[in-house]
Image: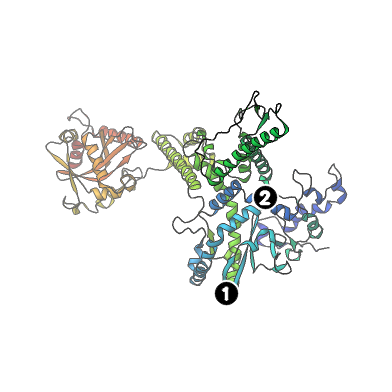
Amino acid sequence: MPNSNKITAKPGFLTSIGIPSKRWASEFIAPAKQITQSDSYLFGSGGTTVASLISGSKKQARTREALYSKFRFMESDPIISSALRLIATASLGGHETTGDVVFLEKKPETKKNKSLEKIADEIILALQPLFNKIAFQVAFTGLSYGDAYARLYTEERKGVVDLYVDEMVHPSIVQAFERGNRTAGFAVFIGNKNFERLDVSQMARLRMPRTQFIPQYGVMEKSLRIAITENDINNLPVLPAMVGGSILYNAEEPYDNLTSSLLGLVGQRWIDSIDEQILTPNLTSMTIEQQKRFVTSIKNMLTASKKRVEEAVSSGRPVLERIRHIIPTFAEKQLTTITPSNGGQSGRAANISIEDVMVHARLTAGAIGVDLSMLGFADQLAGGLGEGGFFRTSAQSAELSRTTRAAMTDFFYHIMDIHTLFRYGFVFKPNERPLAPNFYGSISALEAEKQRTNTEKMNSGLMLTQAVQQWKDLGATKEIMETFLSKNMMVDEDLAKLYATIVEQKDVQEDGGDDGFGGQKPSGIGSMDSIFDDYSSFDGIGQSTSVPIPAKTVKWMGFEGSMSLKADLDALAKRHPEYYSNDPDLVLNDIQFVLANPDDWFVHHGGKVSLFRERKGRGSFPLVRIELDRIGESFVARSVYVSGINQVVKKIKERNRLVARLGRSGQSSGPLTIAEYLNGLGNGS
C-alpha cells in the first residue's frame, strides 16, 4: 500500500490568518475514511466498473488504429479540411508583411537583467524562425488528431538546431506515454523492428485539451495498472496515453450523414443522366435471315451512335453535323414503337432537393465549431445578422482559437526548455522563463468584434458621465445620485455608491480655490489665477492678442468709448487642454462668442470679474466664461473655460447680496454694472 502524505501543523504567523492544518484535515480529509466498497454498490448505484467508459454511449469503443483511420478519412474531406485550416489560421494569425505567426516576447522582468536579456535574445534568434516554420502544420495536425509531434535535433552548446514534423512523426504511428498527466516518453512504430523509443529531449508533443473522453479499448488495461491512490507523481507507472482532444470526434455522425446524403444526391443525378429506350421491331413477315440482318442493322446503328457520342466527349469536340438513319419498311412498319425505359417520362418531373444535404452540412460545421458560411457557403449569411454579419460569424472560429493557443504555448515552452538544457546546461523554472510566446490571431474577425464592443462601452461611459454632470449641476444630493444610477441607469450598487461621491467633490477650477472662483484666496499678485506671474510682466506686446470689445458690450459693462481685451491665446489653450486641445483658435472663438452678447457677470475675486454666456444644446457644460482683470484702459483675459449652470447661479446670488450691502443710494436703479463695481473698489467703498 502506498504511503499517504502526512500533514503536520506548522504553528506561526500563517496559522493566525487561516485554518490550522490539523483542523482542516479533520473536517475535510478524515471523512473519506468512512467510504467502503459495499456502500458503493448500495443505494441504487449498482455495480460500477471501468467498463462504463467503453459502453453505454451512442459510439462504441474502438481501437486506436480505427479512431485515427476515421480522423484521417474525415481530414481529407473539403469541408472538414477547410474548417480545420480556418481554425488553425485564426489561432495563429500572422504578421501582415512578414507572415510570422509566433512571436517570442521578453517579459518585463527580463529587461531589468542584462544577462537574462542576452539569453532571451539568443533564444529568440535561434527558435523563432523554427517555430514559424512548423506552427501551422502542428496546429492543423493537433486539431485533427488531438496530438501532434515534432522530432527535436539538438547539439551540445548550440541547443535545438532543427525540428521535424512530417509523416514519420504522424500521430497514427507515434504512441505517447504518460506518468500521471505528464508526458514521459514516446514509442515510434518505424524502423527495422517497427519500434523506436524516444524521450522528451528528442520529441515534443502538442497535447490538445481532453474535453471529452473517447471510448477505446486501451482504457481497460490502463485501469489495471494505474496507481490511483499514489500521491507522489514520481512513483506512478508510465502508461500509454489515450486518444483524445480531436475536434473531429463529435462531428463523426453528422459527417457520415452528410456523405450519405451527398452520395444519394450524386447517384440520383447519375441515374437521371441515363437515356435508355426499348425498341420493339416488327419481324412478322420476315424470314429468319431477314430477321437476323434487320436486328443486326439496328444494333450496329445504335452502337455507331454510342461510339460517336463517346468520341465527342473524350476528344472535347462537339458534333456539328446532322446524323440520319435509314430504316426500310414494306407493307407493314418494321419499327412499331420506341418506348423509354423509365415508363415514358422524358426526364425528372421535379427538381432534386438539397435541403437534407444542407442540414447535415450545418450540423457537421457546428460540431467542429465553425459556421457553414465560412466554409464556402457565404450565401447562408442572412440579413438578420445585420451589417458586418460576416465578421460576427467569423469571430466564432476566432473564439475557438484560445484552447489551441494554450496547447501551442506549452508545446513551444517544452522546446525552449530543451534548447536551454543543451545550450546552457539548465532549464528555467516554469514561472521564471524569460520569454512568452504570443499570437496575433483573428486579425479581421475578433478584432472587429473587440473594437465594436469597446466603442459601445466608451459611448455608454460618456453618456453616463454627461448624466452625472447634469444631475450634479441641478444640485442632486449623494442619495439622489446613487438612486438614479442604480435604478434608472442600471449601474451596480457598489459602483453607484462610488460614482455618487462626485457630488461631494468640488469642481476643478483654475486657481485651485475652494469653489473655483477664488473666494477663499487671499488678495495679492502671488495668489491670482493668472497665466502671468506678475501684472508688470504684461505690456500687451508679443504673444498677446488684442480682441476688440463690441460697443454694445462696452456700454452694457458701464463704460464709454472703445475698449479691447488682451489675451495670450496659446497660454490660455494650454491652461485647459481638456477643453481646447492646445488650439488657440478655439479659445479665440469662445472669447468672441462671449463678448458678442454676454448673459451676465459676477465677481470672481477682488478686482477680477467673469463674463459668461450660455451655449444652448452643447452638452453637459453649457456655459463659457471669461475671467477679466482690468489693466489701465483695457482688460486682460486671465482664464477661459466652460462651466456648469449650478456654479454660476451661486455666484449671481453672491453678487446680489453684495449689491444689497453696497446700498446703491443715489445711483442708477438698474443692475449693477462692472464699471460701478470696479469704481467702488477704487474709492474704498
Q: Secondary structure at mark 2?
A: loop
In the picture shown, does residue 129 fall above or below 303? below
Q: Residue at 15% across / 36% down in the picture? A: 559
Viewer-closest of 426 and 346: 346
Task: Please identify the residue farthest to the top as the structure is shown.
Answer: 331
What is the distance, in whole Å, between disc 2 and disc 1 at their CAs? 37 Å
Circle 1 — which element?
Answer: helix
* Residue positioned 49% across, 32% down in the render: 488
Could you tell me if the residues under marks 2 and 1 are in contact, i.e. CB atoms within 8 Å?
A: no
Residue type (three-letter) at the residue carrying disc 2: Thr
Q: Is there any visible trace of residue 530 in the rendered image?
A: no
Q: Which residue bears the numbered disc 1? A: 424
Answer with left or right where residue 188 lies relative to residue 650.
right
Q: Is residue 448 left or right of residue 156?
A: left
Residue 123 lies, in percent from the top left, at 53, 68
Q: Nearer the viewer, residue 143 or 546?
A: 143
Q: For the N terminus, which image quadrant?
A: bottom right
Q: Residues within 10 Å of mark 1 (few under 14, many from 20)?
A: some
| Residue where numbered disc 2 is placed | 211
Q: Position of residue 387 (x, y in %)?
A: 46, 37
Q: Does the rendering let one see residue 627?
A: yes
144 or 355, which is in the foreground?
Answer: 355
The numbered dot on residue 204 is none
User: Which residue is at the far left?
Assistant: 561
Indicate the position of residue 12 as horizontal and vertical percent values. 67, 62
Number of marks: 2
Q: Which of the two marks, 2 or 1, is nearer to us in this view?
A: 2
